[in-house]
Image (tube, coloured by chain):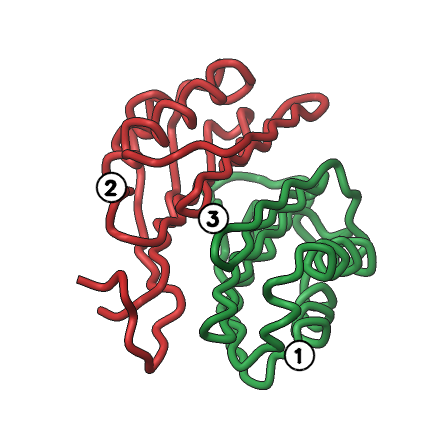
Chain colours: A green, B red
Amino acid sequence: MNALGKQLLMELKDCDKEILNDIDSLKSALLTAANEAGATVLGESFHRFNPQGISGVVIIAESHLFIHTWPEYGYAAADIFTCGNSVQPEKAAEILISKLGARNHSITEIQRGTLDVEESESG
Amino acid sequence: MNALGKQLLMELKDCDKEILNDIDSLKSALLTAANEAGATVLGESFHRFNPQGISGVVIIAESHLFIHTWPEYGYAAADIFTCGNSVQPEKAAEILISKLGARNHSITEIQRGTLDVEESESG
């Protein structure tokens, strides 16, 4: 399909609650996921909330990864947004599932920017 | 619905191409959208690519807004992810559509974290 971007919406349930509230573990998980998927990391920003919960984003040259966690429910929402063919978002998704210890998950794939144009990176 | 987060996936088409390639305009658009929606801005990160295109994210206490632009197609993908009831994501969406001069757009609303739990912020 002639889409500019691909987005994996990840619902991560029954995760390890300690990891969901540990900023270093989450930062490591997202950066590892980005690197193993073949992405080029440009920057990151993580915030911890009181009494619990973390939001984090990793900006990559090919778009971004983010995560928002609710440790009290063992739940995290994560998105992996990529463009081009050089990155393997499914590999990043596998790593996040594993690193967060998610015993249940679902992934919805969304195509972004399905324009009626010639697109140089499609293939 | 008893969801922890709400996500608006915005497809912004036929936008002003100059704005899509101007980092200051996009930063101003996202920050204005966040503030007018009632969100608390915690940080932001924007990157400009060669020869064109910008990626930007604004982290808010209630989650995040991001944008990725393809000026060559007049296209931008934007997401507004919020939790709780204090923010009006639809207002942020209206502002982005207006500030980017999008003559065509579509918005898909996704519920994130629809868990089988009592949730204190639901209303």
Q: Quadrant of the N terminus of chain A?
A: bottom right
CA–CA distance in space, label 1 to label 2: 33 Å
Residue B68 x %, y %? 54, 36
Q: Is residue B42 above or below residue A12?
A: above
The residue identified by callout 1 is A101
Q: Which of marks 3 and 1 is nearer the N terminus?
A: 1
Q: On what subunit does the disc labeled 3 rest?
A: A
Q: How far apart are marks 3 and 1 (CA)?
A: 34 Å
Q: Which of A18 and B1 is in front in this view?
A: A18
Residue that label 3 marks = A114
User: Picture quarter containing residue B12?
Assistant: top left
Q: Would you say the residues marked 3 and 1 are in contact, meaning their CB atoms lie under 8 Å apart? A: no
| Residue B35 position (above or below residue B4) | above
Q: What residue type is labelled 1?
A: Gly
State the mark number for residue B88: 2
Mark carried by residue B13: none
- How dense is the environment of label 1, judged by Cα within 10 Å: few (below 14), some, or many (20 and up)? some
Question: Disc 2 marks which amino acid?
Answer: Gln
Circle 3: residue type: Thr
* Between marks 3 and 2 in the image, the one whose residue lies nearer the viewer: 2
Residue A52 picture location, percent across and down: 50, 59
- In the structure shown, which secondary structural element does the residue marked by tag 1 occupy? loop
Q: In the image, B60: left or right of A41?
A: left
**Element on which disc 2 rests:** loop
Indicate left or right for B112 with A92 as reference: left
Which residue shows up at 73% across the image and 70% down it?
A: A95
Q: Looking at the image, can residue B67 be seen?
A: yes
> From this viewpoint, is residue A88 visible?
no
Q: Nearer the viewer, residue A85 or B23?
A: B23
SS of the residue under disc 3: strand
> Picture coordinates of residue B63 (x, y %)?
44, 47
